[in-house]
Image (cartoon, rainbow, N blue to C red):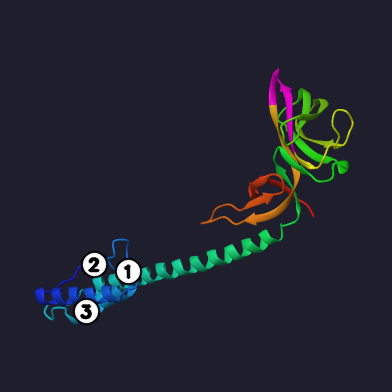
Amino acid sequence: MSINTDNTTSNSVLTSLNAGSKSSSSTTETGTSALGKDSFLQLLVTQLNNQNPLDPQDNTEFVSQLAQFSSLESMQNLDTTLGTFYSSFQSSQALQASSLVGRSVIVNSSKVQVDDPSAGVNGTLVMPSGGDGVTLKIYDDSGDLVRTVDMGSQKAGNIDFKWDGKDDSGELVGAGTYTVKATASLDGTSTALTTYLPATVNSVTLGQNGGEMSLNLAGIGAVSASSIQTIGK
């Protein structure tokens, strides 16, 4: 913004700006007041009051300054609107999250909490391509192998499986957290496979500063919401 004034006028403008800055509630990290729309308007009015009568403000420049003021006000209003929108989004996210507590989900995980072994565990493994020697190995929370399940050859895709909750001797295991490791021979190479297992949502942690929401699952811990494949009842 250009200002055509003499020294007296310049001093008046600076005095006005300083007064506006002292009254401004918006400050930078260094403590200096920022030039908000009120200070901007005060500057414009002071400039008009102190312009040289023999060389008045150019109409084109005056309109340009008004346009700048309008643009500044619009940006500040947009910032306020976005703040309101973000608050509404957080409230909506909190409501959605609360509805997940206590529900069963299918999640990308190798761990599963078994409360009733007699009910068994249903899961899914992902075959990136057809392969042989598909095997499930199930470990207890102490790391001991309790069951090995041979699933033979499988085609590419999502393969459903069920563990009956028994160990290799045919006895039901105890309740607890178990780890399911699936492997297959793909093109002659032993490859670990992705598994999806059921879990119960104990609580939900909302993302901070736009971060992703995480679910706290029984026996598993916190997982990102994006790792959920299916939400059950």
**Amino acid type, callout 2:** Met
Mark 2 / mark 3, whichever is N-terminal? 2
Check if mark 2's residue and mark 1's residue have beta carbons within 8 Å.
yes
Disc nearer the start of the sequence (2/1): 2
Which region of the structure is painted magenta? 178-191
Residue 211, image x, y percentages: 55, 53
Disc number lying in front (2 or 3): 3
Residue at image x 57%, y 67%? Answer: 88
Say which residue appears at 34% left-offset and 69% top-offset.
26
The secondary structure type at the circle numbered 1 is: helix
Q: Residues within 10 Å of mark 3 (few under 14, many from 20)?
A: some
Q: Earlier in the sequence, mark 3 or mark 1?
A: 3
Q: Which disc is residue 1 wearing?
A: 2
* Quarter in which the C terminus is drawn: bottom right
Q: Toward the viewer: 172 or 109?
A: 172
Percent position of residue 182, x then y: 74, 30
Image location (x, y in percent) of residue 196: 73, 40
Residue 68 marker = 1
